[in-house]
Image (cartoon, coloured by chain):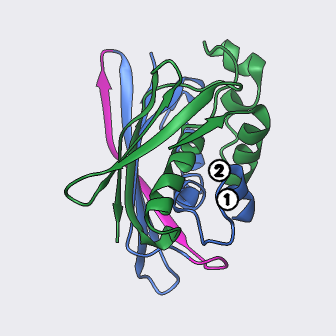
Chain colours: A green, B blue
């Protein structure tokens, strides 16, 4: 389990490093013009943070992560805190999820397969 | 790659973070789809709804990767458009590395 408070700086750093410079993540005015409350975090930033739990479960070796899937269920704005969680399943897979403090789902149907 | 690892609070020395595939699989190719007038994807209304990655092998830093993408499905339902976008990544010798399957929804 881990908790992350999303920040504009982290979202901007992710945009730069990933190549996803969609202005909905960087420009409040643009984000509002398309009906969003303001800039939002990349779904892939959420998934990247969630994937850290899979790497952890793989003993810290990212090469052992064979499959990773999520459903993007909720938007995250800067300043919001998200809790990331994982649970091992009987079939050896890892179940993964992320949600806000009030229970609002952020990432659902998260699943990892490890080698 | 190190900047990417730091941006997701991962250890840059542990190896390539799995979701760095966002950079080498998804955002090497997706801008071509979003920028294609024939595909007519309304970027401002685009939502990334689902994402799946699978790896035969993870790339190493410095490796050259070839990413090929295609629209596997393009469906309209209740005014929203559902685009399934599949990317296949191969190593320099042609051996398979990773595949990405993204579901994009264009809101009405």
Secondary element type, mark 1:
helix
Mark 2 lies on residue: B8
Question: Is residue B105 visible in this depiction of the protein?
Answer: yes
Query: Residue furthest toward the right?
Result: A9
Residue positioned 28% across, 57% down in the render: A93
**Residue nearest the observer in this picture, B74 or A18:** A18
Q: Is residue A59 left or right of residue A79?
A: left
Q: Which residues are magenta?
A: B60-78
Q: In terms of secondary structure, what is the magenta stretch mainly?
A: strand
- Mark 1 — on which chain does it sit? B
| Residue A74 lies in the magenta stretch | no
Asked if the residues shown at circle 2 and circle 1 are in contact, with their CB atoms under 8 angstroms apart, the answer is yes
Label 2 crowd bin: few (<14), some (14–19), many (20+), radius 10 Å: many
Neighbor class of circle 1 (other Cα within 10 Å; few <14, some 14-19, many 20+) is many
Secondary structure type for disc 2: loop
Residue A67, image x and y in percent?
Answer: 36, 60
Image height of A64 relative to A17, above or below: below
Residue A62 position (above or below residue B105)? below
Which chain letter matches label 2?
B
The residue located at (54%, 37%) in the rendering is A43
Q: Residue at x 45, y 57 (%)?
A: A54
């Amino acid at each position: 389990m881990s908790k992350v408070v999303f920040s504009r700086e982290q979202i901007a750093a992710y945009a730069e490093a990933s190549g996803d410079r969609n202005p909905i993540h960087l420009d409040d005015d643009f984000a509002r013009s398309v009906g969003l409350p303001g800039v939002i975090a990349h779904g892939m930033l959420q998934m990247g943070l969630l994937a850290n739990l899979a790497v952890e479960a793989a003993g810290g070796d990212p090469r052992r992560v064979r499959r990773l899937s999520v459903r993007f269920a909720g938007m995250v704005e800067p300043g919001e805190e998200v809790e990331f969680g994982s649970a091992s399943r009987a079939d050896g897979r890892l179940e993964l999820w992320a949600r806000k403090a009030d229970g609002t789902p952020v990432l659902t149907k998260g699943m990892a397969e490890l080698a | 790659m190190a900047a990417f690892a730091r941006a997701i609070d991962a250890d840059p020395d542990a190896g390539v973070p799995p979701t760095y595939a966002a950079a080498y699989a998804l955002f090497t190719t997706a801008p071509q789809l979003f920028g294609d007038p024939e595909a007519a994807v309304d970027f401002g209304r685009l939502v990334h709804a689902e994402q799946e990655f699978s790896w035969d092998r993870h790339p190493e830093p410095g490796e050259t990767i070839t990413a090929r993408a295609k629209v596997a499905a393009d469906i309209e339902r209740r005014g929203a458009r559902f685009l399934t976008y599949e990317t296949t990544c191969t190593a320099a010798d042609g051996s398979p590395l990773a595949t990405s399957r993204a579901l994009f929804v264009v809101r009405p």
